[in-house]
Image: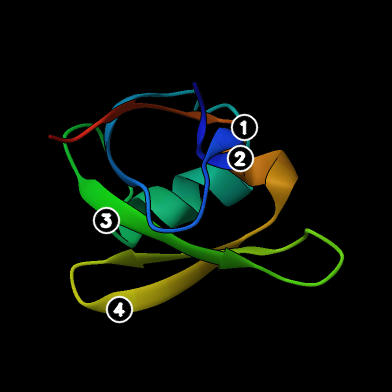
Amino acid sequence: MTLCDLESGARVRIISVAAADPAVQRLMLLGLVEGAELEFLRASLGGDPLEFEIYGAAVSLRREQAQSFAVEPVA
C-alpha cells in the first residue's frame, strides 16, 4: 500500500521510500522518512494533490510522488 491508496482519516507509518526522484528526496527532508507516522487529510476535487498531516504540519503531495512511499496502518 502507498500514500496514494489511503482513505480520508487513515493513520499510517512509512515503511519504505523509493528515493530515486529528486522531488521525493526533498520531501524526505520535510520528515517523510521510514518510521514517520502521518494522517491522510483529504484529496483535492480532481484527486491531485493529496494532503497529509505530519508532525503537526500539513504537507501536499502529487499522486506521482505519493506512490514512492510504502506505508502500513497504525493501530
- Give the Cα separation between the discs numbered 2 and 4: 19 Å
- Which three-letter amino acid code belongs to the residue tagged 3? Gly
**Which badge, 1 or 3, comes first in the chain's sequence?**
3
Q: Is residue 2 above or below residue 29?
A: above
**Closer to the camera in the image, 28 or 16:** 16
Residue 34 pos. (x, y %) = 24, 32
- Which three-letter amino acid code belongs to the residue tagged 1? Gln
- Which three-letter amino acid code belongs to the residue tagged 2? Cys
**Which badge, 4 or 3, comes first in the chain's sequence?**
3
Going by the image, does 66 lie left or right of 72? right
**Residue 24 in which image quadrant:** top right
| Residue lying farthest to the bottom in this orientation | 57
- Find numbered disc 2 in the image and state the secondary structure of the residue it sits on: helix
Residue beneath disc 1: 67
Residue beneath disc 4: 57
- Find numbered disc 1 in the image and state the secondary structure of the residue it sits on: loop
Question: What's the mark number on residue 31?
Answer: 3
Residue 69 pos. (x, y %) = 47, 32
- Which three-letter amino acid code belongs to the residue tagged 4? Ala
Q: Is residue 27 above or below residue 4?
A: below
Residue that appears at 27% across and 30% down: 73
How many numbered marks appear?
A: 4
Tag 2–tag 1 contact (CB < 8 Å): yes
Residue beneath disc 2: 4
Q: Is residue 6 above or below residue 27?
A: above
Going by the image, does 26 lie left or right of 32? right
Going by the image, does 43 lie left or right of 25? right
